[in-house]
Image (spheres, rainbow, N blue to C red):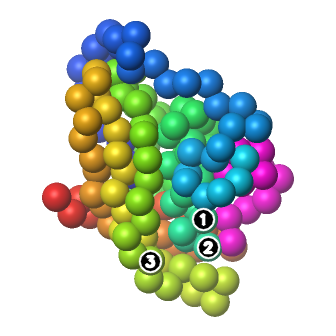
Amino acid sequence: MSRRTTRPKRSATAGARTPAITAQSPCPCGLPATYADCCGRLHAGTVAAPTCEALMRSRYAAFVVRDEAYLLRTWHPDTRPPAVDFDPGMRWVRLEILETTDGSAFHSTGTVTFRAHYTDNGRPDSLHEKSRFVRSEGAWVYSTAVFVD
C-alpha cells in the first residue's frame, strides 16, 4: 500500500474518525490476535516480519493506526517517500489477502495481492493492489506496487 500521492486535504467528518486501537484490541490486519500480540510487536520494533505477507499485514495495520515511522522504516530506501500522507477522511476497514507468491524465509523477493477496504468520508471503496517486497539488509521491505483495478 503506497498511499504516497498527495491529495487535497479535506476536513474529516465525525463518522470518518478511526476508533482508537489499544494493545488489547483485535489486530486490524485480520488475524485472530490482539494488536499487542500481532502487528503491535512489529510496529514497536521488538520483532521483524518473518514473511512478506506478515509485513504486508503489519503495514496495513500501520495505516490503520497511522504509524508513519513504521511505514517509512519498512519502505525500501530506493522508493521511500519523504513522508506518508494520511487522508483525515479515510478509515481503513478490512484487509483481504488474495494471493502470496514467494516471500518466505527462503526467498529474497515476494509479492502479496490484496484488497484493502476503506471508507472515504463515509463512502465505501477498496484498493486492489499487488505489492512487491524485497529483502534489504536481511529484513523484508515494501518496494513497489501495481494497482490491479
Left or right position of 141 against 22: left
Q: Residue flagged by tag 3: what amino acid is it?
A: Thr
Q: Is residue 18 visible?
A: yes
Residue 103 position in % (x across, y down): 54, 79
Residue at 72%, 47% in the rendered image: 34
Left or right position of 48 against 141: right
Residue 8 position in % (x across, y down): 24, 20
Residue 125 position in % (x across, y down): 24, 41
What number is the disc on residue 63? Answer: none
Q: Which residues are magenta?
A: 35-50
Q: Residue flagged by tag 1: what amino acid is it?
A: Ala
Q: Residue furthest right?
A: 46
What number is the disc on residue 51? Answer: 2
Q: Is residue 145 visible?
A: no
The residues tagged by marks 3 and 2 sit, at their Cα atoms, a distance apart of: 10 Å
Sequence order check: which comes first, mark 3 or mark 1? 1
Q: Which residue is mark 1?
A: 54
